[in-house]
């Protein structure tokens, strides 16, 4: 069995009880097969808002047990009511061999995470600049394709464009954190500060990117065009590295 001690000091007090219940469920279901559980994203960064976020986590198993995962999946509806998303399932070996494949995702986790039990699998990670640079370029070009395809699928409906814009928000911020990492800024920052720092690098305002952070704001044709121009400019900047 993994270390029984829970490390919740960095978690806001109102969120500790649902997390304790979540941990109890993980331990009951996975038993000795659970190596560690790590909270990631807003819940780990102290910016959690139940109206916008879910509790995200990485469950590291000693070995992948599909039967256990199937049993665990039965608790999905109950966890959803507590704002707890299905965990990412990994092994220590998977993490070690994925640093070149998913550097941006693992970089984001390493910058904002709290391992609540077990050994921290994301401590002391080493990233190769070339891997991060390549994924930044790939992600920005993928976003451009997504925006074009989303525009066609919207068939003139601004409400659909709004969903397209909001869906790529997290992907964009993750990519921009990678851009800052390449520029020597290794410390994780809130999304708005990430955008401000990249604006300084790019020497232009990223009003379309900023709009994706405001879920209650206007997300219409004008904002869509602005976002597309921003991503185009960022892609050109990435291509010039």
Image (spheres, grey):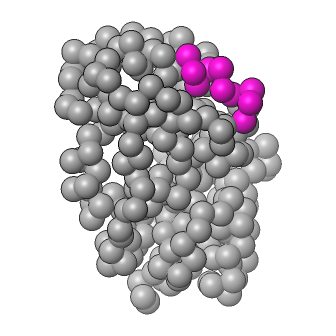
Foreground of the two, 108 or 51 = 108
Foreground of the two, 43 or 240 = 43
User: Residue 97, image x and y in percent?
Assistant: 21, 56
Foreground of the two, 24 or 94 = 24
User: Residue 162, image x and y in percent?
Assistant: 65, 46
Range drawn in magenta: 12-21
User: Residue 106, image x and y in percent?
Assistant: 40, 56
* Farthest right residue in view: 217
User: Residue 158, image x and y in percent?
Assistant: 67, 45
* Residue occupying the point 27% across, 64% down: 100
- Magenta stretch: dominant SS? helix
Q: Is residue 106 left or right of residue 165?
A: left
Q: Is residue 212 above or below residue 12?
A: below
Q: Is residue 44 above or below residue 77?
A: below
- The quarter of the picture where residue 155 lies is top right
**Rendered-image quadrant of the C terminus:** bottom left
Foreground of the two, 218 or 21 = 21
Q: Is residue 202 above or below residue 136?
A: below
- The quarter of the picture where residue 105 lies is bottom left
* Residue occupying the point 70% across, 53% down: 213
Q: Is residue 19 left or right of residue 140?
A: right
Q: Is residue 135 left or right of residue 232?
A: left
* Residue occupying the point 28% across, 32% down: 61
Please count the marks in the image: 0
* Residue occupying the point 20% across, 31% down: 63
Residue 192 visible from this viewpoint? yes
Q: Is residue 41 above or below residue 35?
A: below
**Rendered-image quadrant of the N terminus:** top left
Membership of 16 in magenta stretch = yes
Membership of 237 in magenta stretch = no
Residue 229 visible from this viewpoint? no
């Amino acid at each position: 069995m993994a270390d029984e001690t829970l490390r919740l000091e960095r978690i806001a007090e109102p969120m500790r009880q649902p997390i304790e219940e979540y941990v109890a469920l993980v331990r009951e279901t996975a038993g000795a097969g659970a190596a560690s559980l790590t909270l990631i994203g807003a819940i780990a960064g102290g910016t959690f808002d139940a109206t916008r976020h879910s509790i995200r986590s990485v469950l590291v198993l000693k070995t992948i047990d599909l039967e256990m995962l199937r049993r665990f999946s039965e608790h999905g509806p109950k966890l959803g009511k507590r704002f707890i998303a299905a965990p990412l399932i990994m092994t220590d070996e998977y993490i070690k061999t994925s640093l070149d494949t998913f550097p941006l995702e693992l970089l984001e986790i390493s910058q904002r995470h709290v391992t609540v039990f077990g050994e921290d699998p994301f401590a002391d990670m080493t990233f190769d600049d070339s891997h991060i640079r390549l994924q930044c370029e790939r992600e920005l070009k993928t976003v451009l394709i997504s925006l074009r395809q989303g525009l066609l699928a919207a068939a003139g409906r601004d409400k659909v464009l709004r969903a397209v814009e909001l869906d790529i928000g997290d992907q964009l911020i993750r990519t921009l954190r990678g851009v800052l990492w390449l520029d020597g800024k290794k410390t994780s920052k809130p999304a708005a500060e990430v955008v401000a720092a990249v604006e300084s690098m790019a020497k232009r305002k990223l009003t379309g990117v900023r709009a994706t952070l405001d879920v209650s704001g206007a997300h219409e044709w004008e904002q869509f065009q602005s976002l597309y121009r921003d991503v185009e400019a960022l892609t050109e900047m990435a291509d010039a590295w």
